[in-house]
Amino acid sequence: MTFPAAQIALIINGKIEGDATIAVASFGKIEEAQSGQLTFLANPKYEDYLYTTKASVVIISQDFVLKHPVAATLIRVPDAYTAFATLLAKYQEIMQQQLTGIQQPSYFSKTASVGQNVFIGAFAYLGDHVKVGNNTKIYPNAFIGDNVTIGDNSIIHPGVKLYHDCKVGNNVIIHAGTVIGSDGFGFAPQADGSFKKVPQIGNVVIEDNVEIGANATIDRATIGSTLIKSGAKLDNLIQIAHNVEVGNSTVIAAQAGISGSTKIGNGVMIGGQAGIVGHIQIGDGAKINAQSGVSKSLDPGKAVTGSPAYDYTAALRSQAVNRKLPELEKRIKELEVLIKQLMNERVSG
């Protein structure tokens, strides 16, 4: 399948410089792309490759000034990186639309229902009363438990486990190996030192336009719902405990962990390997640096780092002082010697 430059420009609202009829069939990195491929330039560090690339079409920013002639057809857009992402998404959508039907062997409950243009991969399991929306793709070896609902245009990658009663919205992507709706970590300590399991009878609700990386785990609520709100983006290997709420358009990097009943606001950014205790609130727009340990609630817009986490700006000042400690120690010793000399002169005088 090939696409002419003119059609690509229409998709990303770009302006063409060069041959509008030239066609491309695949993508390539600007330093490696060959004839018949499309690439982009967004990072100035790669500018030199623009003049040597063999790509047929290059997407660049509209305000980029050429220093040398370029052999490729150019498509100018306001933001080259965003335009390229849009084009990749469109290409992926076209390719996925070719997948439809139910592969065998797979288990499909008689009470399960699916919409139009749905794909169910081999060895997938759809339990009782499952509902799957239009254009959704469920890849091989996925488990969809009883009473699960999945909206339109969602993608459930291989090996995903959706436990019973969980709800997944529209345009959601869940990557391979992720487990949604496993039991929350609830155990009541007993007088004899043992622990009694607290049944987890809630569910997980994932709203629209959420993406969850590979091998993440989101526990079902003890009562009610663990909630991932619209537009949230979760990286690989994340643990989210029971009754947590993750706000709209919040992003969480790999290996972060959020303890039970914590409420994460909208537009929060959480770095990799950060840990957040339970039963606290993280305000809208807060920023938590990688490997931070957050033990108390954060106000909206607050930026923290370290373990225990504290103000990011103060942490930078502390780091600057720490780097100067050897010099400060030397100056203190010099001052001590000077003071001692002055004291001796005063006594002898």
Image (tube, rainbow, N blue to C red):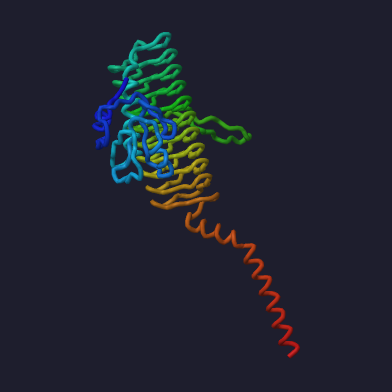
Is residue 316 positioned above or below 90 on the image? below
Determine if residue 176 is in view.
Answer: yes
Query: How many marks are shown on the rendered structure?
Result: 0
Residue 294 position in % (x across, y down): 50, 47
Quadrant of the image occupied by residue 252? top left
Q: Which residue is more in the foreground, 175 or 167?
A: 175
Residue found at x 40% / y 39%: 246
Can residue 151 be seen in this snapshot?
Answer: no
Q: Quadrant of the N terminus?
A: top left
Taking the spot 48% from the left edge, 43% from the top edge, the residue there is 271
| Whether residue 334 is situated above or below residue 187 in the rendered picture | below
Q: Is residue 218 left or right of residue 69?
A: right
Which residue lies at the image location 51% right of the left edge and 43% below the top edge? 274
Percent from the top left, x then y, of residue 7? 25, 28
Q: Give the residue at x 26% y 36%.
A: 17
Q: Is residue 40 left or right of residue 260?
A: left
Q: Residue furthest right?
A: 348
Which quadrant of the rendered structure holds the C terminus?
Answer: bottom right
Outermost bottom residue: 349
For residue 41, above or below residue 341: above
Residue 177 in percent (x, y) is at 48, 25
Find the residue positioned furthest to the top: 105
**Quadrant in the picture for residue 169:** top left
Residue in front for this viewpoint, 23 or 324: 23
The residue sitting at the front extreme is 69
111 lies above or below 164: above
Which of 193/109 is in front?
Answer: 109
**Residue 27 screen position, x and y as percent:** 38, 28
Which of 255/319 is in front?
Answer: 319
Kindly indicate the quadrant of the structure image that contains residue 34.
top left
